[in-house]
Amino acid sequence: MEPVRIGVIGGSGLYEMQGLTDVQEMRINTPFGEPSDAIAVGSLEGVRVAFLPRHGRGHFISPSELPARANTYALKSLGVQRIIAVSACGSMKEEIAPLHIVLPDQLFDRTKGRPSTFFGHGIVVHISFASPYCPELTEVLYKAALGVGAKAHKGGTMLVMEGPQFSTKAESRIYRSWGVDVIGMTALPEAKLAREAEMCYATLALVTDYDVWHESEEEVTVEIVVQNLIQNAETAKSIIRTAVTSLGGPPTCTCSSALENAIITDPSKIPQEAKDRLNLLLHKYVQ
């Protein structure tokens, strides 16, 4: 099968990629179980793309239950080099209004107990994660967003909460005092796993609401979120269709060599079972 270089992870409201032609559905088993759903592989604007609905078609997997390792590993096994992750989020700043698009460049982790590494069990890996998002991919998505007329913000911090409940007002006020820009539930551990898999990763954050800090706005409800999700999803599809045509060549950033100096364990001490199980990730560095 021809390698697929671009992967799209669809978030809430984005369960299929319109415009994808010659579609082949792939059900992939990984050392970490099955992904959220079948992966649709096809052509989008003449570019080979793999689309995976994060929560499954029909939205039956909660943020805390997502098989993030299986999702990332499955995309890697198809040859994906870049992941465009679409994610609904709440705004923590007045100037970032509902229906705006944010391309964050930082993350703050408030999740609890989600598996966030492929490694362990005899192999210790410490990746650099100071800059969690790929700057090249983020720039392409930002230009594409502007190109389709979206109100887009480049940069900012996304706080990732555990969920699935929305914030209390106290939590929301404290998060704002920390200076975060948007709040979501799914960018972690995805971004960490993508970095360990040496894949570029960027989030297309779709703002649905002002969280609950905004006194002049009504409280966040599922109805408000869903209404804005539908409109945002159409914008996201347009951005992705535009962006993929600008991602022809291989990445020139450092994402694709993230493991080069990160594997701390002496190769002779790594269990053969771990080498075999993680060969897809380790083969460049560990024989």
Image: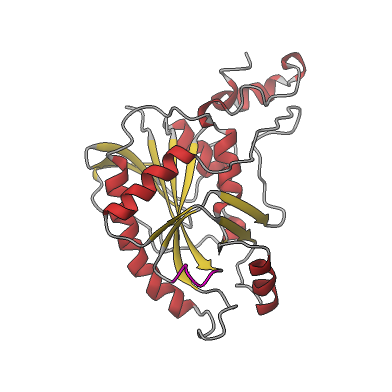
Residue 191 visible in rendering? yes
Nearest to the observer: residue 108 or residue 15: 108
Predominant secondary structure, magenta span:
loop
Q: Which residue corresponds to the image point at 72% horizontal and 53% vertical from the top-left?
A: 113
Relative to 146, is 90 above or below? below
122 lies left or right of 157: right
* Highlighted range, magenta: 93-97
Residue 28 visible in rendering? no
Query: In the picture, which quadrant includes the C terminus?
Result: top right
- The image shows residue 78 at horizontal and vertical percentages of 42, 32
- The image shows residue 17 at horizontal and vertical percentages of 31, 52
Number of callouts? 0
Indicate the quadrant where residue 249 lies.
top left
Q: Which residue corresponds to the image point at 67% horizontal and 57% vertical from the top-left?
A: 111
Indicate the quadrant where residue 42 lies.
top left
Query: In the picture, which quadrant includes the N terminus?
Result: top left
Nearest to the observer: residue 150 or residue 231: 150
Q: Which residue corresponds to the image point at 33% horizontal and 40% vertical from the top-left?
A: 49
- The image shows residue 130 at horizontal and vertical percentages of 64, 40
Relative to 135, is 273 above or below? above
- The image shows residue 106 at horizontal and vertical percentages of 58, 50
169 lies left or right of 51: right
Please say whether residue 128 is one of the residues in the magenta stretch. no
286 lies left or right of 56: right
Q: Which residue corresponds to the image point at 61% horizontal and 17% vertical from the top-left?
A: 285
Indicate the quadrant where residue 238 lies.
bottom left
Relative to 217, is 129 above or below? above
